[in-house]
Image: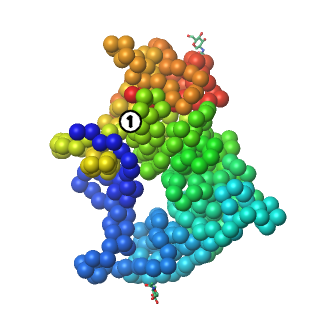
Amino acid sequence: MWFKVLEIHRSTTFAMPHGKVLTSSRLFLLLLLLLASSARGRSYPRFSRNDTEFQHLALHPDPSVGTVYLGAVDRLFQLAGADGLRLQLEEATGPVSDSKDCLPPVTEANCPHARRTSNHNKLLLVDPAALELITCGSIHQGTCQKRSLASIATVRFSTERPVDTQYVAANDPAVSTVGLVVALRGGERTVMYVGRGYTASHPPISTRHLSAEPVFSYEETAKLAVAGRLSEYDHHFVMAFARRAYAYFLFYRRDIKSATREYRTFAARVCLDDASYYSYVEVPLVGRGGGGGGGREGEDLLGVFSGPDASALCVFPLDELDRRIDATRDLCYTQGGRAEGGAEVAYIEYEVKSSCANLPVVRTRGRKGNGEMGVLKELLHNNQSRIHSCCPASSGCYIMST
Ligand SMILES: *[C@@H]1O[C@H](CO)[C@@H](O)[C@H](O)[C@H]1NC(C)=O
Ligand SMILES: *[C@@H]1O[C@H](CO)[C@@H](O)[C@H](O)[C@H]1NC(C)=O
């Protein structure tokens, strides 16, 4: 039985290695501790508020410090995790005078129809190198601040007069935004990957500066450029995470190539240091009930899939997902996107004016360890011009498999 995906609940979707407890499951546990009010939970430290809604949780990168950060509607909280979740600081972030149609800074003169608007926390991320908390709200076109991890009251940077490439989060409480802070080139540079659902013509996936000017902008970094029909795709992001040399995004969107144009769930992967998203590949994820298996080694992605009549918790081994993505990429670059029988199984998506190519297979097609970059990276290094025949530099290369 196959399930159509309507929604994946964020807190129940995370990567976890077999037999090991890791940050994400600890985070999940913490969420339970914070949110559960069962009789058993009473012996654990608790923090609750009845005047707001908690939306995101982040932890100090040093577990011995133990600070817990909460992003909520119109509030940010800093709690001493090692001291019974004692409230250390509380910051008001809203409501403010705002309108979705106005560009910040919002004033009486340039936005007469602005109203008192609640600020929903859309991103709450830790930059461990700079010891900063990144906060982005739904107000003022989803612009962001950097705050000190030692004190969230200390705002180190705020986009006051932003240009549109500095609009980060969705400016709508109901539209999802996910993010990921990544140190590149051995920590020399820090960037933020952002996936945001459709609100206007903003790229669904982008890489943004954190350690260079203009901060939070995707100018001169990479973005997933959707040539047209962005609203028809209607991306809904569920999660972003990094593993080895890659960033991954999980989302559902309309499959506008199919006759029914229904929403499908996808996993996308891009090389962390890819400044043009040439390495960007999407593959569909389908949750199916009644599976078995087990006994493998490695990390798994857990996802909850739900449809009108049923739901399932599905397990996707990440090594298998990588193999699938690699196979899709190889098919598009070396076999014109066609399987052995001639059927089209991989293609270029998002109206990018390009098609899959028939390039010679470059040896060194490693499956493991240092072979991670595989064929595409080899081709990029060996013959830039050939890759351009498949991926126009201006538009990037978005490969999809059916
Ligand atoms: C909310 O919490 C405050 C402080 O703990 C309390 O005084 C108030 O009665 C609570 N309000 C509701 C509606 O529960
Ligand atoms: C790239 O490949 C093409 C076609 O095989 C060849 O003509 C060209 O010289 C190559 N360019 C480089 C920089 O190797």
Give the residue at x 51% y 29%. 349
Q: Is residue 160 visible?
A: yes
Badge 1 density bin: few <14, some 14–19, many ≥20, Cα 10 Å: many
Please tell me whether residue 360 is drawn above or below residue 277 in the rendered image: above
Q: Is residue 298 visible?
A: no
Instruction: Give coordinates of residue 230: x percent, y percent.
Output: 57, 38
Please tell me whether residue 77 is drawn above or below residue 354 in the rendered image: below
Which quarter shows the C terminus?
Answer: top left
Give the residue at x 51% y 69%. 72
**Ligand 2: which quarter?**
top right
Question: What's under tag 1, amino acid-wise?
Answer: Pro
Which quarter shows the N terminus?
Answer: top left
Left of 11 or right of it: where is 360?
Answer: right
Residue that numbered label 1 is attached to: 284
- Say which of 379 and 196 sits in front: 196
Instruction: Give coordinates of residue 207: x percent, y percent.
Output: 58, 45
Instruction: Give coordinates of residue 335: x percent, y percent.
Output: 43, 16
